[in-house]
Amino acid sequence: MAVLPKLFKFKPVMQTLLQGRASNRGLFRLGIATNKIREFHTNEQLCDIYEITDEQDFKKKVMRNSIPVIVNFHADWCEPCHSLKPLLEKIANENEGRLHLAEVLVDDHVDLLHAFEVEAIPAVLGIHRGIVTEKFVGLVSHKQVMEFVEKLLERTAK
């Protein structure tokens, strides 16, 4: 039987689930439906949001992806980047299964900056099957971001 670290204090039901000793009958007796428990584990991330680690990772997750990917070139020190990131994540979650979001930290990936001719941040590219189909630079309005996403999805639907 697995022993959970003492750092975490779980309710007895969760403790039982985490230790793998739960039975459906016991859960229903406690008023917990198993599909709700499955939901608890599967709803953590609605869409694929990638933190790019290196050039190979970028090629695999962005360039070879059959689903359109919004690529957000940003930096920790960039205030407009911090404003744009939650909006892009929200849009990606709203379009689950239709597009993904990739985050590229510019200080760590200068080679990707040069490859995509990014001269200012935030820079957001729409890439589908290895081809840049849409792009915008700087902090833009919510409406402009939505238009960017609509154009990206339209072009990739063809």
Image (cartoon, rainbow, N blue to C red):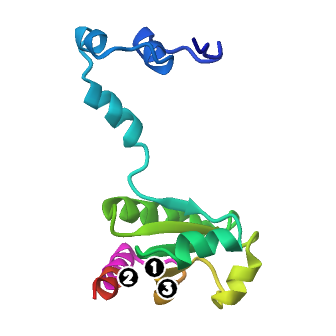
The Cα atoms of the two marked residues, 2 and 3, are separated by 8 Å
Q: Nearer the viewer, residue 149 or 154?
A: 154
- Give the class, few, some or many, for how many residues have Cα within 10 Å of label 2's Cα (few <14, many ≥20): many
In the picture, the quarter occupied by the C terminus is: bottom left
- The residue that mark 1 highlights is 140
Which of the pair 104/65 is nearer the observer? 65
Assess disc 3: are there few (<14), some (14-19) or many (≥20) residues with their C-alpha within 10 Å of its C-alpha. some
* Residue in the image at 41% along x and 36% along y: 41
Q: Is residue 33 left or right of residue 14?
A: left
* Magenta part of the chain: 139-151
The N terminus appears in which quarter of the rendering?
top right
Q: Is mark 1 on a helix, strand or loop?
A: loop
Query: Which quarter of the figure has residue 77?
Result: bottom right
Residue under label 3, please give it. Answer: 136
Q: What's the residue type where badge 2 is placed?
A: Phe
Across and down, in percent, residue 72 comes to 55, 72
In percent of the image, x 40 and y 73: which residue is there?
67
Q: Which residue is drawn at 46% across and 83% down?
A: 129
Q: Do the residues labelled 3 and 1 touch (CB within 8 Å)?
A: yes
Q: Name the residue under label 2.
A: 148
Amino acid type, mark 3: Phe
Cα distance in 3D space between marks 1 and 2: 10 Å
Q: Is mark 3 on a helix, strand or loop?
A: strand
Where residue 117 appears, as percent x and y from the top left, is: 65, 91
Relative to 24, say whether 64 is above or below. below
For disc 1, the neighbor class at 10 Å (few under 14, some 14 to 19, many from 20) is few
In the rendered structure, are the residues bearing label 1 and label 2 in contact, judged by CB atoms less than 8 Å apart?
Answer: yes
**Which is more foreground, mark 3 or mark 1?**
3
